[in-house]
Image (spheres, helix red, strand yellow):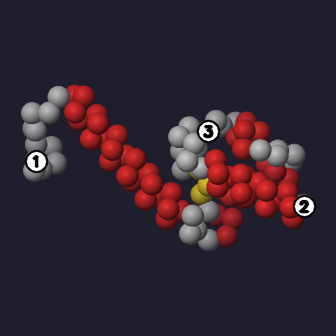
Amino acid sequence: MAQFGEETGATDGECQVVHIESYLILRSILISSIRVGIGDEMVVCVCNAIKEKDLRAAVQSGAEKPSTVYAQLGRKPKCGQCLAFAESIIKSEIATA
């Protein structure tokens, strides 16, 4: 196995696949660990760095689904991994309003 910074002879395309796979693995680990965050400081969307408190504030301002929450925050969903989690928080916030 090549060491960091060592030439591997891999093509750019092969390197990109490895980087994408590594990114996806790290992102899934991050998402899993973030969901056990503390209170409203929990990060809901890693790609856009949206915290639960920001999401709840957007719902309190009238947003009722992820697309309107993200638009209100000036962002767009990227990978989509957070949408189900965001939807559950939105429903929870609407139910308690």
Q: CA distance from mark 1 to mark 3?
A: 36 Å
Q: Amino acid at mark 3?
A: Pro
Depth check: 83 or 37 in front? 83
Estimate the x, y position of residue 58 in percent, counting from the top left: 79, 48
Q: CA distance from mark 2 to mark 3?
A: 25 Å
Question: Residue at coordinates 56% horizontally, 69% vertically from top-left?
Answer: 36
Q: Is residue 60 left or right of residue 54?
A: right
| Label 2 Cα crowd, 10 Å radius (few <14 / some 14-19 / many 20+) | few
In the rendered image, which quarter is residue 97 located in? bottom right
Which one is earlier in the sequence, the residue at label 1 or at label 3?
A: 1
Question: Residue at coordinates 50% horizontally, 62% vertically from top-left?
Answer: 32
Which one is earlier in the sequence, the residue at label 2 or at label 3?
A: 3
Q: Secondary structure at mark 2?
A: loop
Residue 50 in sight: no
Residue 28 in sight: yes
Q: Is residue 61 left or right of residue 17?
A: right
Q: Amino acid at mark 2?
A: Ala
Q: Secondary structure at mark 3?
A: loop
Question: Residue at coordinates 73% horizontally, 58% vertically from top-left?
Answer: 89
Q: Amino acid at mark 1?
A: Ala
Q: Which mark is residue 97?
A: 2
Against 19, residue 85 (above or below) is: below
**Residue behind mark 3:** 77
In the rendered image, which quarter is residue 77 located in? top right
Q: CA distance from mark 1 to mark 2?
A: 55 Å
**Residue behind mark 1:** 2
